[in-house]
Image: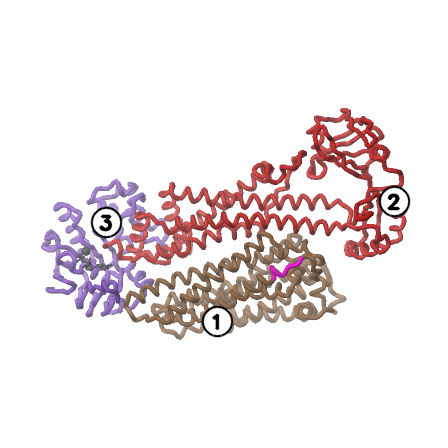
Chain colours: A red, B brown, C purple
Amino acid sequence: MPTWLLRQKYLIDFTLSSLLRRRAKNLGLLLVYTLIVFVLGSVMLFTHALRQEAAAVLEGAPEIVLQRLVAGRHDLLPASHLERIGSVRGVQKKEGRLWGYFYDPATRANYTLMVPHDRTIAGGEVVIGAGIARTRGLARGDFYTLRGQDGQPQTLRVADVLGSGSELVSSDLMLVSEDFFRRFFGIAPGLYTDVALTVRNPNEVRKIAEKLTLLLPDTRPILREEILRTYDAVFAWREGIVYVLLVGAVLAFVVFAWDKASGLSAEERREIGILKAIGWETGDVIRMKFWEGALVSLTAFLVGYLAAYVHVYYSDAALFEPVLKGWAVLYPRFQLLPTIDGLQVATLFFFTVFPYTVATIVPIWRAAITDPDAVMR
Amino acid sequence: MLLNPAILALLGVSAIVTLLVGAATAFGLHLLREWDIASGSELQLRLERRTYLIATLVAFSFVAELVSLLLFVYNAEAMHTQFVGAMCATGVLNVNPWGWPTLFLKIAVFFTGAVWLALNHLDNQGHDYPLVRVKYGLLLALFPLVLAAGAAQALFFLGLRPDVITSCCGALFSPESAGVAAEVAGLAPARAALALAASGALVLGAGSWVLLRGSGGGPFGAAGLLAFVVAIAAVVSLVALYVYEHPHHHCPFCVLKPGHDHVGYWLYVPLFAATALALGAGAVAPWRRVPSLAHAVPGEVRRRTRLAVIGYALFYAVATYAILRSNLTMTDVWW
Amino acid sequence: MIELREVRKAFNQGRTNEFWAIRGVSLTLEDNRVTVLKGPSGSGKTTLLSMIGCLSRPTEGRILLEGRALSGLPERFLTEVRRRTFGFIFQQFNLIKGLSVLENVMLPAYPIGRPRGALETEASELLERFALGEKARYRVEWLSGGEAQRTAICRALINGPRILVADEPTANLDTRLSRDFMSIVRDLRAVGKTVLLSSHDPEVYDSPFVDRVVQMRDGRVTDC
Ligand SMILES: Nc1ncnc2c1ncn2[C@@H]1O[C@H](COP(=O)(O)OP(=O)(O)O)[C@@H](O)[C@H]1O
Ligand SMILES: [Mg+2]
């Protein structure tokens, strides 16, 4: 081993044993440090996961959704519109969609009723999301009665329960047949909720949207990339706000770390004096103390990040549940997809290890420049 | 302005690093005024002890700036989804005029910091600290750079507007448009390959000369800087095409994406490290004439040069490998 | 050989409580001799020893080690010289609590970065030589006064210094242990070490193993 490496190894050995000798004092610091990493890390991993989830959901969404507006409000769209879209170049596929919300007084929750276009559902049947199945205690083969727009109860047989692949959106979903849908909501044939468009070349999405607004002035195109962008910005912004709020906590932690680092006990002071007297150089002491900080930081960071990881991905962010999702009755039990990315780790590093180190530089230096002959007095 | 934790962290780090380097510079200036190495006074002892603080502050700031350079690029990459027209970091840096200057200033801070640390390391081996004036003089150059990098970054982030439609690597690095980036991209791949090979031969040759003859550290540093500039230009105009297997995709950032086996890291990490080391060697070499440093300089130069040569060699090997293994054939474009 | 030329040392220089602890000492100390600085408390023995041992720098005057001027060196290089040339034995032994005897002995070698195996062997040999072999793994707070001092001596010797410096080495020892200490000093001299002691204990300065006594008072050498 080269000398400089050996030297670092000795310094690490020494600082490790000196950390262990002062277990009680260092444990407090370590705990607070870990907690800071845990909280910030949880917020970060959680928003990141939600963002990804949203992106995954939108992955399958159409590139453009066309809505009709009447007096500034969303209205049903006639089939004639559909035909006129056909003349716009670049549109690969167009589909009139039927969907709507239904308030279920029994569970006091809103369900999304939808006519799927990738599967057919028999007249008296329904396919429900896992959330509905859970809250209403329904399973395949059970019967489910709901009251339609005309006040008449309608009974449907549960044909299937949707898997929880991306439960975030399918949790409150009810898939029904077109017939049933139109009867239930009283929507005349030839009218649709909106239109979904598939575009051949994703680079042309904006151009096509422009053409559509010219062709059908009473409609509004909603672009998938726009939604994604908004989602991203909103999530990032929220996360940013939470972090701004947490800056207070980080500052408190910095003060705490500063205090710990500068408030050396008489015993520690004597130890550094001895080290300097027996031949340690100021730089050696600084390096030793640097290793101490690095070990503490590494431990706190790893433990805190791991705890945050488990918290977010394996306990569904149990601690945030009441704050972030409390309003939803059908709380989706989705499995977030675990990921680690460099951006997050680096950011977290700058919110925790960086301030800690800044707080300790001057105290460490002060301790390290102890007079070597101090122990002789 | 857009707000996210990474931006918050970058702004915070810049502010703090500016403060730290500012403090180090102020200490350094004060120190220069009172410095008298021959004196046994308590004041001189205090000043000598303060040099440890200054060096620690600068070293720490250097590491922080390095990580923040990475974070800056990562963040730009991650934010591309929030801007119309941005497909990667290039598009985000283009959102307003401060993106690229920030990046360049951060790189300049990195290299200047590396040179400072090399000088400091050398000076600490001269029993009369002969480079005190040079070192603290250089801090006077480092501080404005750090300040400018921080200011440019703040302007960049404050001026980020989500409604701006930006142009990404496709447009910026297309030979048809104007500007330095376009000119770099417009470099004929054949010429870029030639320049890359020539600068590689130059820097590796200069490095070998230093290792064999023990002199020529200064020219090696200069060759290193030249090799760096040519290498970056060649990545944009040549290597990128092969990595993306697309004859018109010039982008220095997309190579960092996981889709390309992280080949970008294999290119940039050795290149930046080698250049920092070569500049260090170049900065250290001229001081062999100072009596108290004469014993330390050759070793320092040799050590840095050896590592730098390894770094450059790795960079050129990876670049060559990326070109050779690619399925892109440029016969039509080249000849 | 160590030469002191008109060495002066001030504390709190430039302030109202400025105090000159050493007021012009010129002295030559030969190699392989046992020299005792003798004088009342406050006469400047410790201050002088710490300057000779490169723990501090004189305010004025020069100190030369083998003809090389030490006094102008920055602390960084003084430390370098110190850990190769000097070994220190302090009045309060100054062992680090919580560490074992062996670890305490090895501490001065850590910044040098010698391979651990060789270092441990050497430390163990030293401990054997001073009859501490069995206590190597003990924690230092369990040692008796004599054992603690011998541990401190081992620590002073671990980097192979030519010169040993001991400040009031017998102040915390009874007569028997003081004599033991002086016989250790004799042995060290026998293996070629230079020993520099400060003391106002007759057990030390009247010991037959002492070659030279330097009398100090009020920061000056009065008799040597
Ligand atoms: N750090 C200091 N600051 C101020 N005065 C000091 C300091 N160290 C020693 N002195 C003074 O210098 C004088 C000599 O001290 P010292 O060398 O310890 O004497 P001795 O070892 O002979 O007892 C004493 O008067 C003491 O008070
Ligand atoms: Mg004394």
The quarter of the rendered structure image containing the C terminus of chain A is bottom left
Residue that protrudes farthest toward the top in the picture: A142
Q: Amino acid at mark 1?
A: Gly
Q: Position of residue B190 (x, y in %)?
A: 69, 69
Q: Secondary structure at mark 3?
A: loop
Specify whether residue B37 is painted magenta. no
The reply to whether discs 1 and 2 touch (Cβ–Cβ < 8 Å) is no
Which label sits in the foreground, 1 or 3?
3
Instruction: Say left or right for A111 vs B102.
Output: right
Residue labelled with disc 3: C93
Q: Is residue B56 visible?
A: yes
Q: Amino acid at mark 2?
A: Pro
Chain to which the residue tagged by mark 2 belongs = A
Label 1 and label 2: CA atoms lie apart by 78 Å
Q: Nearer the viewer, residue B282 or A167?
A: A167
Chain to which the residue tagged by mark 3 belongs = C
Q: Position of residue A192 (x, y in %)?
A: 84, 42
Specify whether residue B158 is painted magenta. yes
Which residue does the image show at 57% across and 57% down from the upper left? B70
Q: Secondary structure at mark 2?
A: strand
Which label sits in the foreground, 3 or 2?
2
Are discs 1 and 3 located on one and the same chain? Answer: no
Which residue does the image show at 25% across and 40% down from the upper left? C142
Residue labelled with disc 2: A78
Instruction: Say left or right for A287 vs C21.
Output: right
Q: Nearer the viewer, residue B97 or B176?
A: B97
Q: Which residues are magenta?
A: B156-161
Residue that protrudes farthest toward the front in the picture: A71
The quarter of the rendered structure image containing the N terminus of chain A is bottom left
